[in-house]
Amino acid sequence: MSQKIFALLLLMLFSSASYSELVIRVTQGNDKPTKIAVAPIDQTGIQTGEDISRIVEADLQRSGLFETIERRDMLAFPGRAQDVYYRDWRLLGTEYLVAGQLRSVGGGRYQLEFSLLNVTAQKTELTHKVSGSISQMRDLAHLVSDKIYEEITGIRGAFSTRLAYVTAIRKDNKYTYRLNVADADGAREKLVLESGEPIMSPSWSGNGKELAYVSFETGRPAIFRQNLVTAERQQLTNFTGLNGAPSWSPDGTQMALVLSKDGNPEIYLLDLQSNKFSRLTRHFAIDTEPTWMPDGKSLLFTSDRGGTPQIYKLNIATKATERLTFTGNYNARPSLAPDGRTLAMVHRQTDTFHIASFDLKTGRMIELTETRLDESPTVAPNGAMLMYATKQGDRGVLAAVSLDAGVRYVLPSSIGDVREPAWSPFLR
Amino acid sequence: MGNSLSYSVAILLSLVLHIALVGALFIDWQPESKRVIMQPQYIEAKLVELAPKKKAPASKPKAPPKKPKIDLAKKKREEKKRLAKIAAQKKAAEKKRLEQERLTKAEAERKERERQEELRRQQQEAERLRKESEFAEALAAEQALINAQEDEQAANSYRQLIQQRLSENWSRPPSARLGMETLIRIRLVPTGRVVGVTVLKSSGDSAFDRSVEQAALKAEQFEELQAMDPALFEKKFRQVDVAFSPEDLRL
């Protein structure tokens, strides 16, 4: 009898415990892409030559975080928030709707007013205006994408950023090398430099207005800087041996680079005001590929001083070095995400090169790509995606993968082999 | 002199006591360590006759005083005969008495047994009743608990359903991090329709908060709640508080 009473008491105890646990806890999500409809922009009477809504759609879709609604399924094309019948959009199963109106404001300028509507909650999340000339319609579209992306994902959009990359075109047994800059979506490719000799390692300045790169045009590798607006260029190094891997400091006043003038490749610092070089590493092994930590106080670089190429951290003030990677027999080409914590790199566990992300805090390595010969990772300024060079068939192309490896796409490429991508910083 | 004598007695006594004490100290005196284990004595209980014994029949009056001898021989014979007869009579009476006594005793014993039996039966009955009522009480308590538990079980299965649906609907933004938590209150009507969502505690990240609100709003209606006991709905499901806190993220 007493046992029974005890059991009952126990039961009561537990059931009363579960009574206090009234809050339902949701600890897992189904991170499906958010459904969004981008209604065609109302641009009555204006010939833009660009379909702004399509560009926005493509931007959002490419991020992997959105799934867009087919235009042919839409029941109406509202231009303004007050013209929206939520029911129509709810039927399509969309969570959000983008509606916009392009109007001429005179002087060859146009204003795009757009709204992000929450179909689920039946309310307007934001209304915003952007303006530009007729040739800037793609810019306006990317700005719309940035704004919407940030509002919904909580992360700054990087659709208005750009890419620098090198193409090699073979013609009549002779290569032509081109340094190009294009929109982050690969559109509006613009030639920066063309040469019969190799061009390598483009690096953006912190303000996104200049590029540094290595060109062999003088017969041996030399580092140049070039203004993207004025096309003005300047040769920075002309040493014997290797002159390579330039990396602009975050504040734009210095450049880390690799010189082998003293025997073997070492990391140097170039003060861009005084044009003075200072040597940072001193080791018989190869030290190369410097990249800056966001605080500008230390560098990450690749060195084989431990027997295999691994990533090291170098304190510029104290010159103290610290090995960061220990997983895999090859870790090189570090590219740091803006959080200063997630490092993208070329990683080899056994025999294949992959792009991997490495958490500097936890030491966790995650392979992001599964293809062969993936190289030159470069992380977007918002840290959501990274671009890398890979092979499609026997052709070099650029591909992108999100840093959680959830989404991957290949950039529609121009002619020739594409390699050495460099993602620009935020441009405004 | 008398004093010294009485002193010497006292001194002697004290001397003896001291010697005894010292002796006790030197002799390793210990309390008997062996524990005496008392075997309980089992006493065989016997039915005790409670009813007063019937008084044994009074002893026969003594033989009458001898008569003066007249014919001694004859008298003697007669007397002998008479005595024999009396003895036989006496014997028979004694036998009868014993028999009677035995019967009476047996009867008393039987009655006592019956009484005891009755008593035991009554006690058993009382015990049975007591147990029965106790059991009924426990049963009622258990039933109440079971009811509450069933309620709670039903509530839990509905909660699980809600949780599952919300989980399916929850698309976390990339800004979501481990440790973020948004607490919302979902207001429902008995059709299971979501009629309102309010953020009770923000995570501090607006995109994260919105993803949580969206998850609840996207659920739109939990049709399954229509099958719920209305009392239970009123008690527990008109307002449902849900905490969203990711545990399956990398960062």
Image (cartoon, helix red, strand yellow):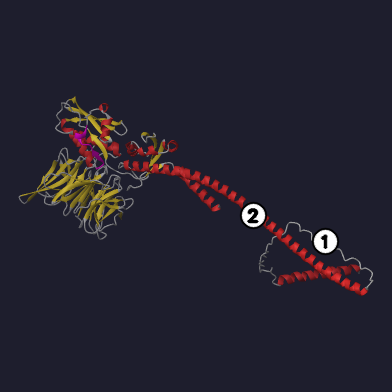
Percent across and percent down for residue A16 are: 48, 44
In the picture, measured across the screen, residue A3 lies left or right of residue B52, that is: left
Q: Report how far apart the C-alphas of labels 2 and 1 lie in the structure.
A: 37 Å
Label 1 environment density (alpha carbons within 10 Å; few <14, some 14–19, many ≥20):
few
- The residue singled out by tag 2 in the image is B120
For discs 2 and 1, the disc positioned in front in the rendered view: 1
Quadrant occupied by the N terminus of chain B: bottom right
Q: Nearer the viewer, residue A367 or A179?
A: A367
Q: Is residue A134 magenta?
A: no
What span is colored magenta in the figure?
A64-74
Q: Earlier in the sequence, mark 2 or mark 1?
A: 1
Percent across and percent down for residue A119 are: 29, 33
Instruction: Reply above or below: A251 against A259.
Output: above
Q: Chain of mark 1?
A: B
Image disc number at residue B58: 1
In the picture, measured across the screen, residue A423 lies left or right of residue A167, that is: right
